[in-house]
Image (tube, rainbow, N blue to C red):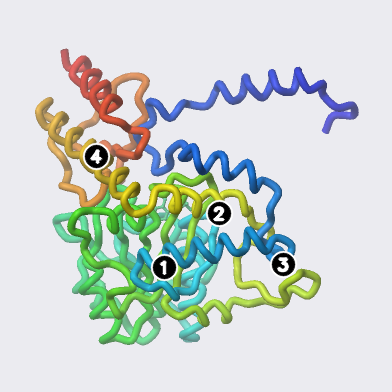
């Protein structure tokens, strides 16, 4: 640390130079994040100093967290779901498996996860000492539910299904997983970190949430398609009481128990998340999602016209192609199977898609 502080002007000029090294979202096609909605940015600034780690000091912000959980619970067909605002999908997935493990104390616990599962499950299994059993995918990049069933045994504490897979944008057969979970008496966690803010706003949404009786918990991230500021995730549970199994005593706080993974927690991004939901409503979210899906379809059509076939027709706004090259200046990503992957987030507008397609056409010219 410096002995004497840096003059403000010099500091900001240094910070600006670093900020300029960041890539603008303009040409980023690989991210599941997006610039926050202007409402989110404004609300974030308003709640900057709030700390949900000690909710008794910030009862207004804590009420907004409750409102966020109620709104997302209702969206997932369970207005009385339990839940709290996490730092994102990783924390939600860890905490869901932590609950599942506490609810079923066995000697050698295992969890059944689709091969498409996000790498946060590798972290969760490592932290929680769980054997990770990987269920294969079918030809359409969705979890093979029957193969998953075959991996379940008496030591299985949970099975996981994904709604909006990170790499291919697929929705696993959650209806069938729900039946299996009920038949086998196993906790079913749904990782809808991405798709949870997409599928409910599609024209004909497939059931994936608490409307299916076997679904135990759901991860859904406002900082992805919810256009909130970072960090804003949510873990929802069918039974609000389950969180009690995570409680630790917190004697010097305004609340005497805490079930969250983090201690100090930002209120700003949580207030921002609920503000976007209130501002847009279901109608506004439907419009955002319809635009992203339309752009995704246009991208697929345009890439196929250029001779790059889709890897699969996605269920949500993630497009993948048999294509090994991207034009200079564009950030795309590559899946484990070597497909080009583009996430059609709200900042990936029709204009961006057309510019990208034109540049793709030029590299072949
Ligand atoms: N689950 C899914 C399906 C994801 O796509 C991601 C991130 O992309 C995560 C979990 C992890 O979320 P986070 O990066 O917010 O921890």
Q: Are marks 2 and 3 in contact (CB under 8 Å)?
A: no
Label 1 – label 3 distance at C-alpha: 23 Å
For marks 1 and 2, the one nearer the N-term is 1
Q: Residues within 10 Å of mark 3 (few under 14, many from 20)?
A: some
Residue occupying the far right of the picture: 3
Of labels 2 and 3, earlier in sequence is: 3
Tag 4 near tag 3, CB within 8 Å: no
Disc 4 is placed on an element classified as: loop
Q: CA distance from mark 2 to mark 3?
A: 16 Å
Looking at the image, is mark 1 or mark 4 earlier in the sequence? 1
Looking at marks 4 and 3 on the same chain, the residue that comes earlier in the sequence is marked by: 3
Q: CA distance from mark 1 to mark 4?
A: 35 Å
Image check: 223 left or right of 172? right
Mark 1 — residue? 73
Look at 38% across and 76% down and name the residue there: 216
- Residue drawn at point x = 50 percent, y = 50 percent: 275
Q: Nearer the viewer, mark 4 or mark 3?
A: 3
Mark 1 or mark 3, which has the lower sequence index?
A: 3
């Amino acid at each position: 640390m410096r002995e004497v502080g840096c003059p403000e002007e010099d500091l900001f000029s240094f910070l600006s130079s670093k900020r300029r090294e960041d890539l603008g979202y303009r040409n980023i096609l690989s991210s599941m994040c997006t610039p926050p909605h202007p409402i989110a940015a404004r609300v974030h600034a308003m709640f900057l100093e709030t700390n949900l780690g000690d909710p008794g000091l910030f009862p207004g912000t804590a009420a907004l967290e409750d409102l966020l959980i109620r709104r997302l619970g209702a969206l997932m067909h369970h207005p009385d779901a339990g839940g709290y605002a996490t730092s994102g999908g990783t924390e939600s997935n860890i905490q869901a498996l932590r609950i599942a493990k506490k609810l079923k104390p066995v000697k050698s616990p295992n969890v059944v996860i689709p091969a498409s599962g996000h790498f946060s499950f590798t972290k969760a299994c490592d932290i929680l000492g769980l054997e990770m059993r990987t269920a294969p995918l079918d030809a359409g990049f969705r979890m093979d539910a029957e193969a998953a069933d075959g991996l379940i045994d008496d030591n299985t504490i949970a099975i996981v299904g994904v709604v909006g897979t990170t790499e291919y944008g697929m929705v696993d057969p959650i209806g069938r997983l729900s039946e299996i979970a009920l038949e086998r008496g196993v906790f079913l966690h749904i990782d809808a970190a991405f798709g949870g803010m997409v599928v409910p706003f599609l024209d004909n949404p497939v059931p994936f949430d608490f409307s299916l009786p076997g679904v135990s918990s759901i991860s859904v991230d406002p900082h992805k398609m919810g256009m909130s500021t970072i960090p804003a995730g949510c873990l929802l549970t069918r039974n609000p009481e389950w969180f009690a199994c995570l409680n630790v005593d917190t004697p010097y706080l305004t609340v005497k128990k805490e079930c969250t993974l983090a201690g100090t927690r930002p209120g700003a991004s949580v207030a921002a998340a609920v503000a976007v939901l209130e501002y847009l409503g279901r109608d506004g979210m439907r419009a955002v999602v319809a635009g992203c899906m339309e752009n995704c379809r246009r991208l697929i059509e345009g890439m196929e016209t250029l001779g790059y076939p889709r890897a699969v027709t996605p269920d949500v706004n993630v497009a993948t192609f048999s294509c090994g090259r991207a034009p200079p200046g564009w950030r795309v990503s590559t899946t484990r199977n070597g497909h080009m992957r583009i996430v059609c987030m709200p900042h990936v507008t029709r204009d961006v898609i057309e510019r990208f397609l034109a540049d793709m056409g030029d590299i072949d010219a």
